Image (spheres, grey):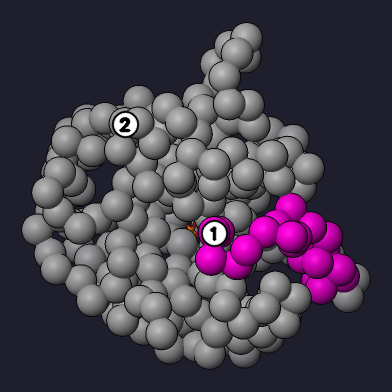
Amino acid sequence: MSKQFVIGNWKLNGNSDQIKSVLGAVAQHQFAAEVGVCVPFPYLALAAETLKGGSVQLGAQDVSRYASGAYTGEVSAPMLKEIGCRMALVAHSERRQLFAETTETAALKIRLCIDAGLLPVYCVGESTEERNAGKMQETIATQLDAVKDLPVDQYTIAYEPTWAIGTGASASPGQIAEVHGFIKDKLGNGARVFYGGSVKGSNAASVLATPGVDGVLVGGASLNAQEFVEICKAAR
Ligand code: PEP
């Protein structure tokens, strides 16, 4: 069985001092699980320097759907790889909701990550309305089209119901187990599926002990070194 994976997502937060202090503190620990942090683009190089020589992996929060060319403002998968990234989040729900990311563009990004040697962490999940309308499975099945035909060892899935992100209200272990089981049934048992949505120090152990959970994606709580370390230590 592979190690669990804890990935922090700093979103649009932080500055140079916080990168040095928070990541510097996290990097001093040894973890049984794999650990990664996705920081804003301008701090990737500083984060790479801060994490150098340790086991904490670096990731980006997004990646271009293009490999190179006349695409002002974009950052490509090969560029991220070159500066030390090991992974990139793809289609986080905030990008789907606020920046018109689609499953089709996600599919392009996932393939470019794989070609560049980055692990794509592909985010899927339903909204409250979709869940209440009985469309949770349909929504996620459609989102999973982005990885169809890809070998399961080349990507990971992060199940992040939008109603649990940043709300303080994590999905229950029963809800998480149900959806992770559904995703693994669709993709095959080798698929690695992480959960994200209000994971904190206080609920990490129970989330990580839930059947089918191969790791967690952590937003707000990853900005605090002590709490993020607590979550990382709960993973095995
Ligand atoms: C996220 O941003 O992916 C996330 C899960 O956020 P939070 O942990 O703050 O809910």
Which residue bears the numbered disc 1? 154
**Residue 165 percent across, percent down from the top left:** 57, 59
Q: Quadrant of residue 205?
A: bottom left
**Residue 119 percent across, percent down from the top left:** 47, 52
Q: Give above or below for 210 relative to 16.
A: below
Beta carbon at label 2 within 8 Å of ligand 1: no
Q: Quadrant of residue 150?
A: bottom right
Q: Is residue 97 visible?
A: no
Q: At x 23% / y 76%, what residue is drawn? A: 32
Q: Is residue 57 left or right of residue 76?
A: left
Span colored in magenta: 135-155
Which residue bears the numbered disc 2? 83
Q: Is residue 192 visible?
A: yes
**Residue 101 percent across, percent down from the top left:** 71, 39
Q: Quadrant of residue 34?
A: bottom left
Residue 150: within the magenta?
Answer: yes
Q: Give above or below for 57 relative to 135.
A: above
Q: At x 48% / y 39%, what residue is drawn? A: 116
What secondary structure prevails in the magenta region?
Answer: helix
Residue type at tag 2: Ile
Label 1, secondary structure: give it: helix
In which quadrant is the N terminus drawn?
A: bottom left
Q: At x 75% / y 76%, what residue is drawn? A: 186
Q: Give above or below for 113 relative to 68.
A: below
Q: At x 78% / y 43%, what residue is drawn? A: 104
